[in-house]
Amino acid sequence: MRTATRGPATPPAATRSPSGGDPAAAGTATPGTAAPDTPAQDTATRDTASAGAGNADGTDPRPMGRHLLSAADLSLDEATLVLDTAEELARVSQAATVKKLPTLRGRTVVNLFFEDSTRTRTSFELAAKRLSADVINFSAKGSSVSKGETLKDTALTLEAMGSDAVVCRHSWSGAPANLARWVRGSVVNAGDGTHEHPTQALLDAYTMRQRLGRVEGLKVTIVGDVLHSRVARSNVLLLHTLGADVTLVAPPTLLPVGVGAWPAAVSYDLDAVLPTSDVVMMLRVQRERMGPAGERGTAYFPSAREYARRYGLDVRRAQALPDRAVVMHPGPMVRGMEISPEVADGVRSTIQEQVANGVSVRMAVLYLLLGGAQPAIGSVPSEPGRRGLS
Amino acid sequence: MTATPSTPSPVLPATPPPATPPPGRPPTPAAPGSRAVLQGSDVLRVVDRIAHELLEKTGGGQDVVLMGIPTRGTTLARRLAARMAAFEGATVPTGSLDVTLYRDDLRLKRPRALEPTAVPSGGVDGRLVVLVDDVLFSGRTVRAALDALADLGRPRAVQLAVLVDRGHRELPIRADYVGKNIPTSLGESVHVLLQEVDGRDAVLLGAAGEQR
C-alpha cells in the first residue's frame, strides 16, 4: 500500500521536523502559554489513529460508523490517503467517457443542510452521484424543521429511511458531532457554525499539492476573519498534520481567545508575512455572524475601507509574494473587501481550481467512509479528545 | 478474451471472501515456505513467447493497446510492448487500468487505496485492447477490468494476457495468452515477482494457508 511507504507510524514530531529544520521552530510558531498541552494531546490522538490505520486488511479494532467531524479526525496517513485517492479519482474522471463509477451503488447519502450553501451542497451531491450513490437533499427551508422538528428527530427520521451517510451543515458549532451520536451511518461535517469544515481543508491541501507539488514545509498564511472561520480552524489542524507552517494574520479583534494554543503563528502585519509565504489564503469577513452592533458588523473594525487597506490582498501586495506563491479563497468572496478583483482573477489565484478539486476530494472522502465493509478514515464518536481546537 | 455480447451482465451476488484474496495485489516478500516455479531467465522467456504470440495473433501488433492491471500487470504490459518493439519494431501503446472501484468484493473489506489509471493518448476506442495481469485466478479482477474499460471507451475487441493461470475460475472468463499454467489448490498462493517492482523475476508457489 502506498500510504505505508509515505507515512510510517512515526510520531508527528518526527514527521514534522524536516519542514522546520530546527526543533525550536514549532515552539516559536506557537505564541501564548497553552502550547504544551496541544502537541501532547495531538501525539496521543495521532498514535491511536495510526494504530488503527496500520491494520490494513480488515482487522480494524474500531467499530463501524466512523465520521469526519473535524480535520483533527485524520491522521497523517489518513489525510494522505484521502489526497492520493482524490488524485486518482480526478485522473479517472478525466480519462473516462462515462464519468460515473459504480462504487457506491445502492448506498444512500443524505445532504442535511440547515444553512444556505450552493458550492458545498452541489459539490457533495455531484461527488456522491459520480460514485453512483443515491442522494437525498434536505434543506431546512420547506421541511419539517420549519414546523418545529428538532435536529434529533430529523436525524432519526432520516436514519429510519436507511441513510448510509449524512452530510451535515448547521449554523450551530457541534451539531454534526451530536448527530454522530444519534445515527448509525457516517456523518460528514460540511461546516458547523464557526467550528470546522474539514472537507474544505482537504480540498485546499489538495490544491496546494497540485500547484506546488507538496504540502509539507509550505509556509501558509491565512488572512482575515479567523474568529468566525471554520475554514481557518480546519485548515490549521490539517496543515499542521501535513507538516505545513501556518501563520494567521488578522486584526486582534478577529482572532479567537484561545488562538495561542493553536499550532500556528500569529501576526497582525500582512506586509511583513507576504514575502515568505508560499500560499496566501484569504478569508471572507463574515458580517452575518457579527451581530447588529452599530452599523452592521463594524464593531470588529473601524470600517470596511480600513479593513481592506490593512488586510485586503490587492495587486500591490500580491507583488510582494514569491514567484510561485498562490492565492486561495474558500468562497464566497467579497471582491474589493478582502481580495481585489485583479488578484482574484489573476494567474496566482486557485479559486476556480478549489471548486473543481472539491468534487474529487469529497468523492475520496465518501469512498473511504462508505466504499468498504468499514470506513478507512475518520473518528468514532465515543473517542473524546480527538477534536482539536476549542 | 473477447468480450462477447452473450456474456451475462456482471451483476454478481455478494460472495464470501475466497480463502486467498484475489490476485493482482502487491505480495508481501516471498514467504520462506514458498518454492520458485519460474525464475530469472524462465520469466524472460515466457514474456518473450507471449510477445511473439501477440504479434502473431494481432498481425504485428496493429491497433493493439496493452492495458496492465496494477501493479505487476502494468509492468508486464510495458515489458511486452518493449519486446514487441524489439522483435518487429511494433509501436504498441501501453496504459494502466485500476479496477479497485469496480470490484465486486468492495463491501467485504476496508476501502483500499487506489492504483494509477493511465490511458494512452490515442484512447481505446476502436482499438484491440489486451488486458494484462500477472495471475489469473477467480476471474473477478478481469470482470472488474471489463467494466472499467467500458467506461473508458469502446474497444473493437478485448483480449486477456496473463503470466500465470492458476485455475479456480469463478466466472466464465479465460485468457487468450497464458505464460504458464500452474495447477494449484485453493489454499496455495502464487506470487509473481518482477525486476522493476521486486528486484528480481520469479513466480513463487506458496504453501497452503499462506496469505498474500
Image (cartoon, coloured by chain):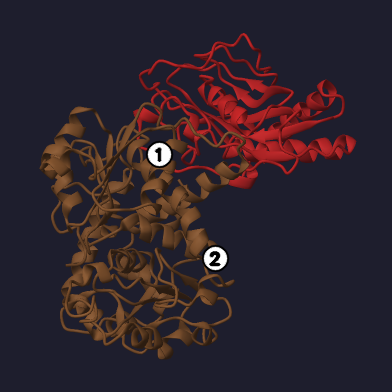
Chain colours: A brown, B red
Please tell me whether mark 2 sits on a helix, a strand or a loop: helix
Q: Nearer the viewer, residue A47 or A116?
A: A116
Which image quadrant for residue A367? top left
> Residue at horizontal 26%, vertical 84%?
A301
Mark 1 on the same chain as mark 2: yes
Q: Is residue A307 visible?
A: yes
Residue A340, relative to residue B53: is it above or below? below
> Looking at the image, which is closer to me, A83 or A346?
A346
* Image side of residue A389 versus residue B15, left or right: left
Rate crowding at label 2 as few (under 14), some (14 to 19) or many (20 or more) other CA atoms within 10 Å: some
**Residue shown at 40%/88% (left/top)?**
A309
Residue farthest toward the front in the current orientation of the protein: A295
- Check the image and name the residue furthest to the right: B88
Q: Residues within 10 Å of mark 1 (few under 14, many from 20)?
A: many
Q: Is residue B159 above or below residue A1?
A: above
Q: Quadrant of residue A192?
A: bottom left
Chain of the residue that carries numbered disc 2 in the rendered image = A
**Looking at numbered disc 2 in the image, what kind of residue is underneath it?**
Arg
In the rendering, at what x and y percent does residue A316 appear? 52, 87
Q: Earlier in the sequence, mark 1 or mark 2?
A: 1
Disc ID at residue A128: 1
Q: Which residue is at a point 43% across and 90% down the rendered structure image?
A: A271
Expressed as whole percent of the image width and height from the top left, the position of residue A250 reads 31, 82
Residue under pointer 2:
A211
* Observer able to see residue A4: no
